[in-house]
Amino acid sequence: MSTARGVPPSLASSLPRDIAAAAHEIGPLEELIEEARRLGFSLPGTLESAIDKRRREYLAGRISGGYALRQLLGPDASEGEIAGDDDDVPRWPEGVVGSISHGAGFGFAAVAAADRYRGLGVDVERVVSTEQAGRLGARVLNEREMSLRQGSAGVLSEAEMFTLVFSAKESAYKALFPRYRQVLGFSDVELEGREAGDGGARCGELRLRTRVARESGTVRHLVGWYALTGGQADEVAGGASRVWTVVVIPA
């Protein structure tokens, strides 16, 4: 099992041991400010006048990133803010790749050594409604991706499969962009397959591919991991159904 703090157990048990992950609930602003202070950073001045939701999301994401770094590098690794560059990509310590997400009521982050992975992306999403999945499906999924809804990895609902593919592509973009600085559309990344983990269809491994224009159309193969939480077997606070994904570019 990977090193994880606050991450759903079904996802933590699927991740490789060399990926450290953390999640933190997007709670009251005062509590998040205090938690950030314990990690050695505060809300940046550029966000002092931002709306409450933006400040809470930022802090929950950076808190998650700080705890993930501590797990990977040691207890003093996260001193200070994880700042962003001009493209708002987090600046990680030398030799580290990672990603931060905030959504569905949580901040979520994962990090790993750069000599193990060339890029890493994460995402967390609330499962959309069946109506939303039907209305937006053709913009996000191709026929092959929708066919992965059922099979040896177990059956997911249309809404769950839509959200899983959307989230996996978001994680793939976050893994690819810091390295290639190339803006991608939904059709530029394809989910090729998913394999069930110990939790059946609710968690497991993903296989993706993309063409990288800056490498003369080279096909990049990516791998990932996912977990669906909520419903009758809720593993996290709030009771909502969520999809959590982590995608990496292998070294």
Image: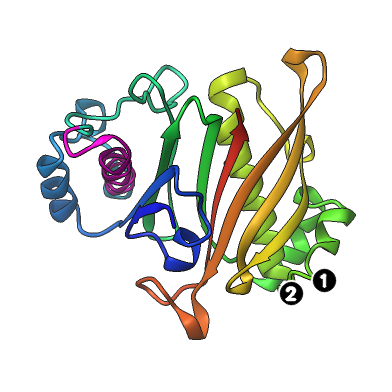
Residue lying at 77% horizontally and 57% vertically, measured from the top left:
137
**Looking at the picture, which amino acid does disc 2 mark?**
Gly
Q: Is residue 132 visible?
A: no
**Front in this rendered view, residue 23 or 83:** 23
**Front in this rendered view, residue 100 or 59:** 100
Task: Quarter of the image for the N terminus: give it.
Answer: bottom left
Task: Quarter of the image for the C terminus: give it.
Answer: top right
Residue lying at 66% horizontally and 25% vertically, measured from the top left:
183
Secondary-structure class at tag 1: loop
Residue topped by disc 2: 154
Residue 180: x percent and y percent?
62, 19
> What span is colored magenta in the figure?
56-76
Residue lying at 57% horizontally and 33% vertically, measured from the top left:
175
Residue 133: x percent and y percent?
72, 64
**Front in this rendered view, residue 28 or 6:** 6
Residue 86, located in which quarter of the rendered image? top left
Residue 46: x percent and y percent?
25, 26
Q: From this view, report whether residue 28 is shown above or below residue 116.
A: below
Q: From this view, report whether residue 249 is shown above or below residue 130.
A: above
Q: From this view, report whether residue 163 is shown above or below residue 230.
A: above
